[in-house]
Amino acid sequence: MTAAALVLGGLALCAGLAFALRGGLRSYRRTRVIGLDPGGLVMSGIAVAVAMYLFGPLFGLALTLVVVLHEFGHVAAFRAIGHADARFRLIPLLGGVAISDRAPDTPAKAAFVTLMGPAIGLGPMLVAYGLAPWASTVDPNLGLFLVTFATVAGALNLLNLLPVWPLDGGRLAGLVGGAFWPPLPMLIGAASVAALTILAIVAKSLILGVLAIIGLQNLIVHGADEMRAPGRQMPRRQAVLVLAAWAATAATLFAGGLPLIQRVL
């Protein structure tokens, strides 16, 4: 795919997501951010500085931007479904939490909020890849940053879509799987933990091992309770659409994040 096609495709995705999130891209209340006080701002600054120190300036900055963009996607989705209280809380180190005082009242709305975190990074990822060759002719560091941002956006958001609780993918598995068979979310979670454990051992990957431990801990502590869909069960037709959107998003993120995935794993 040419650079121009990547940029145009990315801009089209941005426009489509902006339409889907209409009404949620701005706050009608005062923005609430942990760390708005001077001390908190200093801590947030330290968080970014530590990330840049640990991972290098370009990677650390890209990672911070991807995390913030991901959580903003959740917040915008909350607001788009009528949760005006939704806000983004930045918690050092490199932490972000999208918060609303009430849960979505239908499984479809819950799936929308859950998927928008990873999905909002699709457009910027493609645009960054498309602009990188041109940016490299202006400043090699700028081109390198765009590629770094794109690979981090793809890999991190793909990681978040793995069907392991409490990741977004685990929540989607609960919403979609429960529509076909109530015990299915629990089985998906257990199978995912087993697969991650095997992959972690084979690839000698600390990241996959940590994810497997987190998933196992949540299965033991919460069982199927946390994975149940809010309110009534999602209709199967909606579940199929959510599954298709989940798969398409994950496939695109995999293609974008593959260079980083190969390097890390």
Image (cartoon, grey):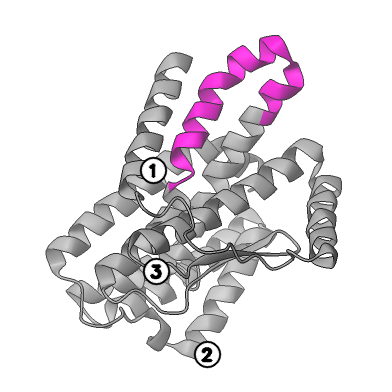
Q: Nearer the viewer, mark 1 or mark 3?
A: 3
Give the residue at mark 1: 251
C-alpha distance separating marks 2 and 3 = 29 Å
Q: Earlier in the sequence, mark 1 or mark 3?
A: 3
Give the residue at mark 2: 221
Front in this rendered view, residue 216 or 35:
35
- Is residue 161 among what the camera can see? no
Q: Residue at x 40, y 55 (%)?
A: 24
Helix, strand or loop at mark 3: loop
* Left or right of 145 in this view: 124: left
Looking at numbered disc 2 in the image, what kind of residue is underneath it?
Val
Looking at numbered disc 3 in the image, what kind of residue is underneath it?
His
Q: Is residue 127 found inside the magenta-colored segment of the image?
A: yes
The location of residue 125, given as percent across then percent down, is 51, 35
C-alpha distance separating marks 1 and 3 = 30 Å
- Is residue 118 among what the camera can see? yes
Q: Earlier in the sequence, mark 1 or mark 2?
A: 2
Give the residue at mark 3: 83
Q: Is residue 193 above or below residue 24?
A: below
